[in-house]
Image (cartoon, helix red, strand yellow):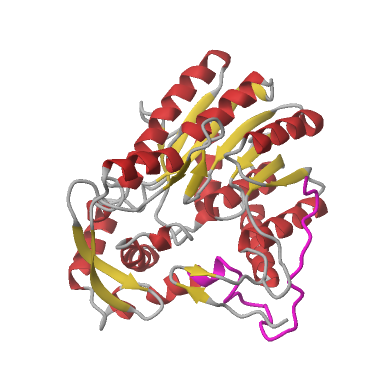
Amino acid sequence: MIIQPKTRGFICTTAHPAGCAKQIEKQIEFVKAQKKFKGPTNVLVIGSSTGYGLASRIAAAFGAGANTIGVFFDRAAEGQRTATAGWYNSAAFEQQAAQQGLKSFSIVGDAFSEHIKAKTIDLIKAELGTVDLVIYSVASPRRTHPVTGETFSSVIKPIGAAYTNKTLNFHSGEVSLTSIEPAIDEEVRQTIAVMGGEDWGMWMQELSAAGALTKDATTVAYSYIGPEITHPIYRDGTIGKAKNDLEQTAIKLNNLLQPTGGRAFVSVNKALVTQSSSAIPVVPLYISALYKVMKEKGLHENCIEQMYRLFSEHLYSEDVAGVDGSCLIRIDDWEMREDVQTEVMKRWEELNTDNASTLSDLAGYRQDFFQLFGFHMDGVDYEADTEPEVDILNRV
């Protein structure tokens, strides 16, 4: 079939297997061109098929030669419906890992469930013995609690008062005002249940109890802080409450792991185009302006550059630079530089529909969005008849 992008709001409902494979190849080529680092040996990535989780798996495997297990919830192709981008990404990763002689396995299922936790632990013990790094990078709008059976749904809302500011329709280029009503207490509770640290803590407790962790195991989850312009909808909103919970979980896990030499961190990353960030009002316009400024200053990074820097300069450097007492690693340092933020905020005040393509990197945002789904990649024939059904090697 001829596979073309079909969009619905902030998601693309199709994905291209050859384009996704090209994207994986590009990320691997970047890592292989960098200096190798002495890093982890056996890595579990929970939420490994897109974004920072995928980049983490690539950085560990091709930067340090690590064996990896990826856990993700993605859909295979069916009839005229393509697979999800995460499925194609994982298939391409497994193929590349096999060619490099790296041991890797993929588990497809609900990471929140006890079944997938138990299946993952069994696989670790059978194939790797233990893991010395656990990456937690799950992004889901819903979660069913494995004990109580309650299903929670997350929302992206401010807390306390409605929030009004500029936002961007990156498809049309229209800049408009958006207003978001505040969350009620129940929505805050459910968002924390989905996006907070409880499930990360459950994973680590169960891995530890099963003897699936090395004594000096490291675990990392991902977060974002950002500038004041995004705080009402992000850091001070429902998502921010969940991230606060995640960071508190890091402190608890660090206390759990530290006696045997283990560590727990939250890495605060740069704002990037992801399926999740595209859904947050205000954020796409901020990212577009940020991209323009950071590219002009030669500071721009995508997921893979961020994760390579996290691994090589922080987690596996002689000292974990940039970590404060709250278990945070700040690799958003370039984004948050004073000169960068001053220029972004100056442009923010001026941005409108007429100048969005010149004051911000609207074209770059669009390209990155479509590349998430395997489109707009150089070297891919999008008019070619393409087989949508792709197997994932070593899928357990």
Quadrant into which the N terminus falls? bottom right
Q: In the rendered image, which quarter is residue 102 located in? A: top right
**Nearer to the camera, 287 or 331:** 287
Q: Magenta span covers which residues?
A: 368-396
Q: Is the magenta region chiefly helix, strand or loop?
A: loop
**Nearer to the camera, 342 or 123:** 123
In the image, 138: left or right of 43? Answer: left
Residue 2 among magenta residues: no
In the image, 339: left or right of 264? Answer: left
Residue 267 seen in render:
no
**Nearer to the camera, 51 or 181:** 181
Question: Residue 337: image x %, image y %?
Answer: 30, 51
Q: Residue at (37%, 81%) from the top-left corner?
A: 172
Question: Residue 306: image x %, image y %?
Answer: 49, 50
In the image, 124: left or right of 255? Answer: right
Question: Residue 280: image x %, image y %?
Answer: 36, 59
Residue 386 among magenta residues: yes
Q: Residue at (57%, 48%) from the top-left corner?
A: 53
Q: Residue at (51%, 18%) from the top-left corner?
A: 256
Residue 27 seen in render:
yes
Q: Is residue 31 above or below residue 378?
A: above
User: Residue extending furthest top?
Assistant: 259
Quadrant into which the C terminus falls? top right
User: Residue extending furthest front?
Assistant: 149
